[in-house]
Image (tube, helix red, strand yellow):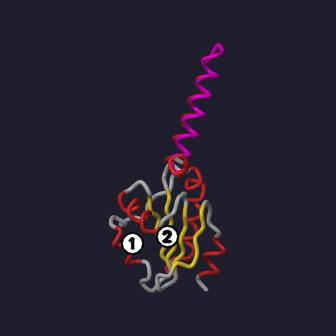
Amino acid sequence: MSAFINQYSFVILAVLLVAVAGVVLLTRKPRWNDYLAFAVILGGLIGAWIILHPRQTPLMDNSRAVQEMIGAGIPTLLEFQSPYCLACTAIAPRVEQLETELGDQIHIIRLNVQDPVGRELSAVYHFEFTPTFIFFDSQGRELWRQVGGLDAERVRSSLK
């Protein structure tokens, strides 16, 4: 149950916010600006999700490809995330910035736990919450895990 709440936290929070705003709107005499405010809240939530939701690394369509990248001579940061997870959405820009900054020094693989590859590998790497980051050295040995956030400095220091 906690994994469900974690992976769908953005959706749960958005539905609750819209429901509360709807109840408030219906319990008083709504004016046109009340409807406008409701539409802005709804549009803002949809827009935030479209712009910010984390995306899976392209071309990660089978678990064998992911496991072959781990230990292929370059350190790997594996991120398990959900596009409906509030913490995953919040951390996505930092992961993208790190990927741009470190370039060819590291493979950063982002997997959606709701896709088949993410589900299959989540059983292999045994974790409970998203986002979960697992750092592997160039030989494929797991060096550390971090749940709920990402310490970019820890990633940089692990590359040295």
Q: Residue at coordinates 58% horizontally, 67% vertically from top-left?
A: 97
Q: Nearer the viewer, residue 124 or 46?
A: 124
* Amino acid, disc 1: Val
- Label 2 crowd (10 A; few <14 / some 14-19 / many >=20): some
Look at the image and say whether residue 13 sits in the magenta stretch.
yes
In the rendered image, residue 84, in percent from the top left (x then y), is placed at: 50, 48
Q: Are marks 1 and 2 in contact (CB under 8 Å)?
A: yes
Quarter of the image containing the C terminus?
bottom right
Residue 32 lies, with reference to residue 127, above or below; the image says above
Q: Place residue 22 in its image quadrant.
A: top right
Q: Place residue 133 in its image quadrant.
A: bottom right
Main secondary structure along the magenta-highlighted residues: helix
Distance in Å between CA atoms under marks 1 and 2: 9 Å
Q: Residue at coordinates 50% horizontally, 82% vertically from top-left?
A: 141
- Label 1 crowd (10 A; few <14 / some 14-19 / many >=20): some
Q: Which residue is mark 2?
A: 78
In the rendered image, residue 153, in percent from the top left (x then y), is placed at: 66, 74
* Residue sitting at the far top: 29
- The range drawn in magenta is 7-34
Q: Which residue is mark 1?
A: 66
Residue 96 lies, with reference to residue 76, above or below; the image says above
Q: Nearer the viewer, residue 124 or 73?
A: 124
Q: Say whether disc 1 or disc 2 marks the residue closer to the N-terminus.
A: 1
Q: Residue at coordinates 52% horizontally, 73% vertically from top-left?
A: 77
